[in-house]
Image (cartoon, grey):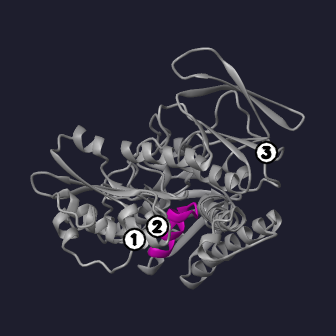
């Protein structure tokens, strides 16, 4: 029967989870195809998400450093610095083209067929792509997520006034006033881009703090730093409506817990209140699959749905919507389909906010650790006391290590630093191997590096840091 299938595996979606699953399956000897309707591979992440946003974050940071006079103290005097936004967008587009093209190359190298078109299920072993029926012994759903709409605030990226994250990556000019609805990761990152380039940025967040889900102390410190940079952060505030006239938007806002309404005028508005799984239009009903209340597909530990031939990974299943989570799940699912053992430790998935400074965490926050009944010890170390950070005049932030008081096992690590996204890898690896804070504290770290702050924070768990 297996010989009658067109493929051993078809992956629906070529985002970080999908393309990685397809390549890994092909490496394991499975005849594999990937269905993708975009003109380029890579999904949201590479086309209109992670990669273009990081390109703009990097270039806007360089511009701010050059334009603000921040380099003068290092003996670098610049004058006549000007913004060429068209070139900035062009460089962003170049990075996207190189990376999406790289996936196409990897597909060819690993003999993964690209089925060009959006897929819908015809049965548990069949999909329709661009009017053609294709069969496979196994199918992985890896369709990712899209922007969550906000009732009363209509997004029109073409008009360029009220936009979502895709539109915010392509604004043709720097708005005088940008309002970001949502104080989460995407809103703060894109808000950072346009603030650096000269916009006044107001962040409106429904909750009482920005960055929901992160360690509370980290959230407070982040807000303090962002306000110092010039962000106007209005927490505990909800947006109830929006109108557009003469190229400007007027938002109606009111206190989240009730109160008098007011308005905010802006040249551009970014709606960034979260993302939702892309499960509509797949024809799940044709194969007997239903989604949960969040629109997600439920799977078992191996990423198999209740239909034995159908699997799911990434943003369409429960858990944080992170590209690297999807990648690991894609590899694990492919290995399980190939008869191997593929696993993902969902307790050790790092998260990063690519603002300046960066914010990163892995494992439990202090609040979560207490809620789970852990008796904890906490060690902290400020970058103000780190020799490399101080030499670089890059001292914002700190490292926080949370350990179980009984066995010293590390439960969580949280970092605010210009290099937090890189530094968190050490903490993630330590936790994957069940390290204690003492293990980190007694591991030799190169000097002078920002990473020494992790060592010192681990030492602080036992009350014995050297440099504070």
Q: Nearer the viewer, residue 363 or 379?
A: 379
State yes or no: residue 17 in magenta: yes
Q: Are marks 1 and 3 in contact (CB under 8 Å)?
A: no
* Residue carrying label 3: 176
Magenta segment: does it hold 38? no
Res. 340 image quadrant: bottom left
Q: Residues within 10 Å of mark 3 (few under 14, many from 20)?
A: some
Establish if 172 lies above or below 289: below
Q: Residue furthest left?
A: 406
Looking at the rendered structure, the number of numbered marks drawn on it comes to 3
Q: Which residue is mark 2?
A: 419
Residue contact at pointers 2 and 1, CB within 8 angstroms = yes
The picture places residue 199, in percent across and down from the top left corner, at 73, 48
Secondary structure beneath dot 2 equals loop
**Can see residue 141?**
no
Q: As rendered, which of 125 and 411 lies closer to the eye?
A: 411
Q: Give the residue displayed 63% in from the left and 56% down from the top.
A: 128
The label shown at residue 157 is: none
Q: Nearer the viewer, residue 399 or 132?
A: 399
The residue range painted magenta reads: 8-24
Give me the C-alpha separation between circle 1 and circle 3: 36 Å
Specify the quadrant that holds the C terminus: bottom left
Q: Which mark is residue 450?
A: 1
Mark pair 3, 2: CA separation: 30 Å
Local crowd at mark 1 within 10 Å, few (<14), some, or many (≥20)? many
Q: Nearer the viewer, mark 2 or mark 1?
A: 1
């Amino acid at each position: 029967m297996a010989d009658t299938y067109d493929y051993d595996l078809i992956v629906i979606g070529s985002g970080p989870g999908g393309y990685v699953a397809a390549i890994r399956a092909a490496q394991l000897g499975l005849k594999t195809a990937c269905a993708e309707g975009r003109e380029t591979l890579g999904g949201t992440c590479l086309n209109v998400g992670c990669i273009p946003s990081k390109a703009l974050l990097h270039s806007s940071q360089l511009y701010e450093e050059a334009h603000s006079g921040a380099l003068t103290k290092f003996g670098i005097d610049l004058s006549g610095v000007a913004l060429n936004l068209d070139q900035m967008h062009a460089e962003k587009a170049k990075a996207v083209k190189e990376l999406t093209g790289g996936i196409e190359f990897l597909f060819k190298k690993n003999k993964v067929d690209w089925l060009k078109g959006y897929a819908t299920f015809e049965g548990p072993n069949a999909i329709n792509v661009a009017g053609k029926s294709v069969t496979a012994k196994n199918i992985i759903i890896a369709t990712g997520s899209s922007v969550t709409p906000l009732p009363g605030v209509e997004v029109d990226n073409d008009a360029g006034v009220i936009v979502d994250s895709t539109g915010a990556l392509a604004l043709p000019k720097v708005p005088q006033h940008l309002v970001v609805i949502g104080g989460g990761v995407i809103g703060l990152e894109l808000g950072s881009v346009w603030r650096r380039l000269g916009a006044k940025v107001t962040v409106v967040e429904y909750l009482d703090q920005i960055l929901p889900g992160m360690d509370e102390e980290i959230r407070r410190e982040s807000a303090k730093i962002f306000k110092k940079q010039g962000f106007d952060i209005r927490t505990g505030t909800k947006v109830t409506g929006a109108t557009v006239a003469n190229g400007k938007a007027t938002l109606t806002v009111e206190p989240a817990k009730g109160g008098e309404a007011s308005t905010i005028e802006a040249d551009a508005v970014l709606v960034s209140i979260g993302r939702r799984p892309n499960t509509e239009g797949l024809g799940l009903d044709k194969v007997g699959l239903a989604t949960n209340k969040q629109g997600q597909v439920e799977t078992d530990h191996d990423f198999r749905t209740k239909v034995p031939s159908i699997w799911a990974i990434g943003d369409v299943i429960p858990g944080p919507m992170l590209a690297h989570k999807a990648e690991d799940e894609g590899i694990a699912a492919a290995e399980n389909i190939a008869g191997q053992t593929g696993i993902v430790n969902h307790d050790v998935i790092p998260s990063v906010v690519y603002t300046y400074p960066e914010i990163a965490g892995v494992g439990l926050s202090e609040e979560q650790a207490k809620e789970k009944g852990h008796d904890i010890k906490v060690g902290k170390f400020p970058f103000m006391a780190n020799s490399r950070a101080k030499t670089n005049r890059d001292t914002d932030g700190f490292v926080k290590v949370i350990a179980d008081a009984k066995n010293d096992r590390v439960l969580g690590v949280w970092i605010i630093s210009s290099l937090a996204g890189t530094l968190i890898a050490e903490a993630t690896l330590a936790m994957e191997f069940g390290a204690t804070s003492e293990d980190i504290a007694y591991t030799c770290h190169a000097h002078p590096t920002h990473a020494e702050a992790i060592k010192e924070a681990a030492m602080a768990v036992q009350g014995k840091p050297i440099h504070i």
